[in-house]
Every structure is written in structure tokens, then in C-alpha cells.
Image (cartoon, rainbow, N blue to C red):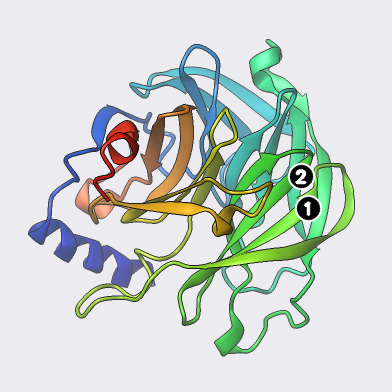
Amino acid sequence: MLQKLSLCLLGLLLSQTLSAQLVTTGKLPDFLLESSGLALGKETTIWTFNDSGGRQELYQCNTEGKHLRTVKIKNAPNNDWEDITQDLGNFYIGDFGNNGNKRKTLHIFKITNPNTTDSLALKASKISFRFEDQTAFPPPKTEMNFDCESILWFENHLYVFTKHRTLPMKTNLYRIPDQPGELIAKRIGSFATGVAQPGEHPWFGYWITAADISPDKQKVALISGTTLWIFYDFEKDLFFEGKMKKIPLGPNTQKEGVCFLNNDEVIISDEYIRRFDLGGKLYTLDLKPYFDYNVL
């Protein structure tokens, strides 16, 4: 699968260039080849980590990619860390990658927000959950809709967005309380991410790989390898029932992290693809033109 995806990426790269709106700000350190989630740190820094099989560590970097600090997370094995979010006092690390849809229990590790402490090691408590509508592990090949790579926090709840491996391409939204325990993820919404065009990879542009909510809680961002969706003017947590802007990013790399730097700007990370010496970078995108001038 990875080989096919890499070949697809190469073909896209030969025919298209990076979106003009994205600004490359820096390259991530060599030990961060699979950055798979972003959370905002102090003084315009970011926290990230490597996904499945990586160390149980968070890495703080500036927006140029310079490594500033490492924090070890105790009691939080990295089976498949995929995304990260925060409230005022805590970080939540999503260990819910589920490529084969076989995991019966998924986890979110809750730690003290490292922006509020100088500690180099933090102990996690565990939120364990399962999707209310998954009854087979794995389900039939036509219902492989329980992989997950995206999370955000909003009003005492965590919201996870699924990564579907069957058609039609969409993401389901589930709500979970933000307190440790064994919990059920309640499905509250669904969003169709699109239909592949002729010659286009059927998955890469439509898998949701990261999410975030703006500091003022007025915008929600979802990202795939080629697209950023911004949802706004929603009521409470009905994110998909508000308005939406779809922003093409260019099919350049495997984007796996997004977070808001402020209410009008996001930072994006992508994984490094050694075979083609691509990615492993940080990018910023100014959202104001899309809202001020209604260009999309």
C-alpha cells in the first residue's frame, strides 16, 4: 500500500506544484520523520511526535523546525499515536490509529499541558473508548470505517473524526467525555470528503488525517493530503451543519498535522518520504483571504 501511495505521490509531484498559499517555514529534525499531529506551544511553538512505533515522547519545535525540548510520556505506549489536542490545562494524545479496524479498544492519553510545566517527564491517565456502531473487529470489507487519525477538544468533550477505508469517502464525527474511564464514542455527524477524479488516487485526498479548533472556537479545521476544510458558523458542536470553505493545498506530500496558530492562521506538517526526499516540513497558511474576499 505504501509503495502504491509513494508512486502516486511521485506522479502528482511531476504534474503539479505546491499551492501558492502555503508558506514553507522550516524542516523538522531528522528524528521526526513521521510527524503525525500538532498542538500549539508557548511563543508560537508547536508540539508534535512520531506515529505508530515511535517513542513515547512529545517534541517541542519552533515554526522553523528547530527542536527545543523533549517530554517523555509515562504510561502511554505508542501503539499508533495519530493526533493531539489541548484544553487550558491538559493535552490529549490520540492512540487510536486502527488501519485494520481490528482494535476493540482505542485510547486517548491525558497529560498535564507541557506548556504549563518545565518537567521532562509526564504521567498519563487513560481514556479508553470504542465506537458505538462498531460490532465486528474487523468489520466486513465494505464497512472499514473505524480507522481514526484526528481529534479536537471542545467544551469538556473530545471529538474524533474517522478515516474511512471504503467508499463513499467520508468522515464520521464522534463525541467522548474528556475524563478517564472506559467510554463509548457517540456518533453525532458525518461529512462527505469528496469523489476521486479520473486518474486521481482514490484515497489520498479524502482521508482525514488531522483536526483542530481555533482559539476562539469559531472554526474547525480538517486536513487530508491535498485539502484543508474549514467549518464555521456552526451551533454548539454541530460542526458539519455550519458553513464550509474548501481550500486545495496541492497534492505534494502526506500531510498529517494541522493546528491553529491564531484564529486566522494554521500551521501544517507532513511526513518525510525518504524515497523521494519529500516532506518532513512545516508550512503556514493565512486563512484571512478566504474569508475576507470569499475567494472559494
Residue 284 seen in the figure: no
Q: Of the numbered discs in the image, which one, if any, rests on residue 176?
A: 1
Amino acid under label 1? Answer: Ile
Q: Is residue 53 above or below residue 88?
A: below
User: Could you tell me which quadrant the N terminus lies in?
Assistant: bottom left
Which of 60 and 268 lies nearest the eye of the viewer?
268
At mark 2, the secondary structure is strand
Residue displayed at 55% across by 37% down: 218
Q: Is residue 80 above or below residue 232?
A: below
Q: Is residue 58 above or below residue 100?
A: above
Residue 170 placement (x, y as % from top left): 50, 70
Q: Of the numbered discs in the image, which one, if any, rests on residue 157?
A: 2
Label located before the other in sequence (2 or 1) = 2
Callout 2: 10 Å neighbours few (<14), some, many (20+)?
some
Q: What residue occupies the far left of the structure in this picture? A: 15
At mark 1, the secondary structure is strand
Residue 91 placement (x, y as % from top left): 69, 32
- 2 and 1 marks in contact (CB < 8 Å): yes
Amino acid under label 2? Answer: His
Residue 292 seen in the figure: yes
